[in-house]
Image (spheres, rainbow, N blue to C red):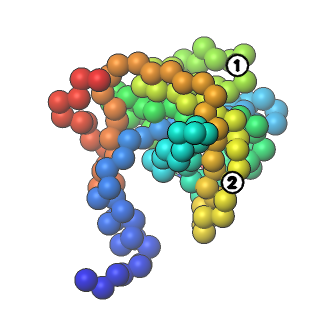
Amino acid sequence: MALDLEQTRLRQVLGRFATGVAVATCRDVGGKPQGITINSFSSVSLEPPLVLFSMARSSRRLADFLAAGRFAVNVLAADQQELSRRFAVSDDPWCGLACDQDNTEVPLIVGALAHFECRFETSHDGGDHVIIVGRVEALAERPGAPLVFWAGDYHQLVGATG
Ligand SMILES: Cc1cc2nc3c(=O)[nH]c(=O)nc-3n(C[C@H](O)[C@H](O)[C@H](O)COP(=O)(O)O)c2cc1C
């Protein structure tokens, strides 16, 4: 099979790989919470505890994440699809959002299935993306089913009880 690297085709075929959905969050230099929907989250290393996600160079929020010393990855639950959309498109995704983390260093998404609070470790060139690596410093989880992204759309994981 010839490898057709046309962008839309590449995106379409990559979409066959089912992922969870997360919102990466940080504070900008002014202390305002920032967040972006991601599905490029991945584990890297257990010792030391490293995780990564890739962020488009074109993202308005890239500079915030590169400047922030800390960030969090919030793994979305099955009932948080609206949040995924919001943090992908909205100019002000935090507007009206229940966020009881106003005074914490890293804003966390309430109701997420898991939180990974990370110290920024390093970044790498990733073509039109930047690979952001964080060292996990704190963890939390709760039972529940995850939000799944597959073939360009949201799905529920049948049978997931958490
Ligand atoms: C399910 C889903 C997964 C996404 N994953 C990523 C990702 O891993 N990295 C990324 O840079 N953008 C990702 N995006 C796109 C961003 O959420 C956002 O739409 C885009 O960065 C918009 O640009 P802005 O940051 O300038 O607002 C994803 C969007 C969706 C809906």
x then y, percent, for residue 40? 48, 50
Which disc, if any, is residue 104? 1
At mark 1, the secondary structure is: loop
The outermost residue toward the bottom is 2
> Which quadrant of the view contains residue 82?
top left
x then y, percent, for residue 44? 53, 47
Dot 1 surroundings within 10 Å: few (below 14), some, or many (20 or more)? few
Ligand 1 within 8 Å of the CB at mark 1: no
Of the 4 image quadrants, the one containing the N terminus is bottom left
Q: Kindly identify the amino acid type of the residue bearing the numbered disc 2.
A: Ser
The outermost residue toward the right is 30
Which disc, if any, is residue 123? 2
Residue at (34%, 81%) from the top-left corner? 3
46 relative to 3, above or below: above
Q: Nearer the viewer, residue 162 or 85?
A: 162
Q: Kindly identify the amino acid type of the residue bearing the numbered disc 1.
A: Thr
Which disc, if any, is residue 21? none
Q: Nearer the viewer, mark 2 or mark 1?
A: 2
At mark 2, the secondary structure is: strand
Residue 53 falls left or right of residue 132: left
Of the 4 image quadrants, the one containing the C terminus is top left
Q: Nearer the viewer, residue 33 or 5?
A: 5
Residue at (46%, 26%) from the top-left corner? 114
Residue at (32%, 66%) from the top-left corner? 13
145 relative to 35, above or below: above
Gap in Å between the C-alphas at discs 2 and 1? 24 Å
x then y, percent, for residue 117? 61, 29
Which of the two discs, 2 and 1, labels the residue nearer the N terminus?
A: 1
